Image: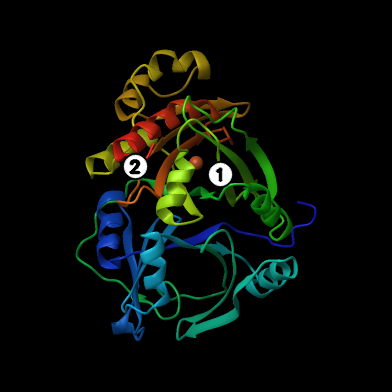
Amino acid sequence: MDNDFLPLMGTYYIEFYVGNAKQAAHYYKTAFGFQSIAYAGPETGVRDKASYVVRQNKLTFVLTTPLHRDHPISEHIAKHGDGVKVLALKVNDATSAWKETTKRGGQSYMEPTILDDEHGEIVMSGIHTYGDTVLLFIERKDYNGAFMPGYAKWETNYNPTETGLQYVDHCVGNVGWNQMERWVKFYEEVLGFKNILSFDDEDISTEYSALMSKVMSNGNGFVKFPINEPAEGKKKSQVEEYLDFYNGEGVQHVALATNNIIETVTDLSNRGVEFLKVPGSYYDTVLDRVGQIDEHLEPLKELGILIDRDNEGYLLQIFTKPVEDRPTLFFEIIQRKGAQSFGKGNFKALFEAIEREQANRGNL
Ligand code: FE2
């Protein structure tokens, strides 16, 4: 990008506020194959909350829970249920990131702050984005502790194997009615992102419901934030259902990349992760649409993995059901074989599958 005032090196971690971090961490280890990395809580001198850090390749999740009723995180959970609070991005200069973004209208969440302990130093700053979600800028110079200052190494005898998940491919936000343009502008003006793809309600509608989506990307493409807004349909859009249950805007799904989606999804399914299923008839015609692919169709069909193609190649993708009882946050598992797009050819089949789930919940 000609004018990259905010160079980003990718996603450093995602922090979830949850009702029970100890059990959530166990779930991400057991079901998704994350490894125990670090812990912060009363035993490490943090009096008001507990955080568990788990990692798999370049994916780092932090699960945080408050220890007291009057804690701000308690309010967050009462309002939203479990969900994503923080998208933490790697930068070389967290002070500059904060100055450049707040100067352009970003609302400060945290002024540049130095965190240090005997293992070194980290500089952290942040701004607000949609809903109660925040973007943190993390500058990690030569810090060599377990995770960050305040955290101790988490040693445990329970270390389930990994499932081949590699890194955050993209992270999608749901915003309210007529809020799309506001947030596209925010990512353009405050963060210097570009709108690389747009889908309107013509692209993303079924007989019953619709949504609009725009993909925002930073200059080097390491950070992609698609934004969804509900659109008018005969029945309730999945984005509207999310907004109702999350009580506002927030992260809808995080896409996790794998190098072998058949192995990864087989493993995840065996560990109890639940996926959305499209009808078997999807596979009768899919190859007419996407052409030749390297994989055998049979395992893809068995697992319910979707296929799409663009000018640059193809991609394989599948979506989990929500990972909480509220129909809010879910995950996408994606393997890119050249394609840089987001599976537009699958939208209809996928959204019909989501609508069947909405109908089962009585929310369509
Ligand atoms: Fe996605």
Q: Measuring from the top left, give residue 263's x and y in whole percent.
A: 33, 36
Residue at horizontal 56%, vertical 44%? 228
Q: Is 200 in front, or is 340? A: 200
**Amino acid beneath label 2:** Lys
Q: Which residue is mark 2?
A: 321
Dot 2, how many residues are within 10 Å of its Cα: few (below 14), some (14-19), or many (20+)? some
In this view, which residue lies farthest toward the right? 2
**Amino acid beneath label 1:** Asn
Residue at horizontal 39%, vertical 47%? 330
In this view, which residue lies farthest toward the left? 157
* Label 1 residue SS: strand
- Circles 2 and 1, Cβ within 8 Å, touching? The answer is no
Label 2 and label 1: CA atoms lie apart by 18 Å
Q: Is 232 in front, or is 118? A: 232
Residue at horizontal 29%, vertical 40%? 274
Dot 1, how many residues are within 10 Å of its Cα: few (below 14), some (14-19), or many (20+)? many
Q: Measuring from the top left, give residue 249's x and y in whole percent.
A: 51, 55
Residue 272 visible? yes
Which of the labelled discs sits on residue 137, or is there none?
A: none
Q: Is 7 in front, or is 62? A: 62
Q: Measuring from the top left, give residue 106's x and y in whole percent.
A: 67, 66
Which of the labelled discs sits on residue 228, or is there none?
A: 1
Residue 256 visible? no
Picture layout, residue 43 above or below residue 259: below
In this view, which residue lies farthest toward the front? 234
Q: Is residue 23 left or right of residue 66?
A: left
Q: Measuring from the top left, give residue 299's x and y in whole percent.
A: 32, 25
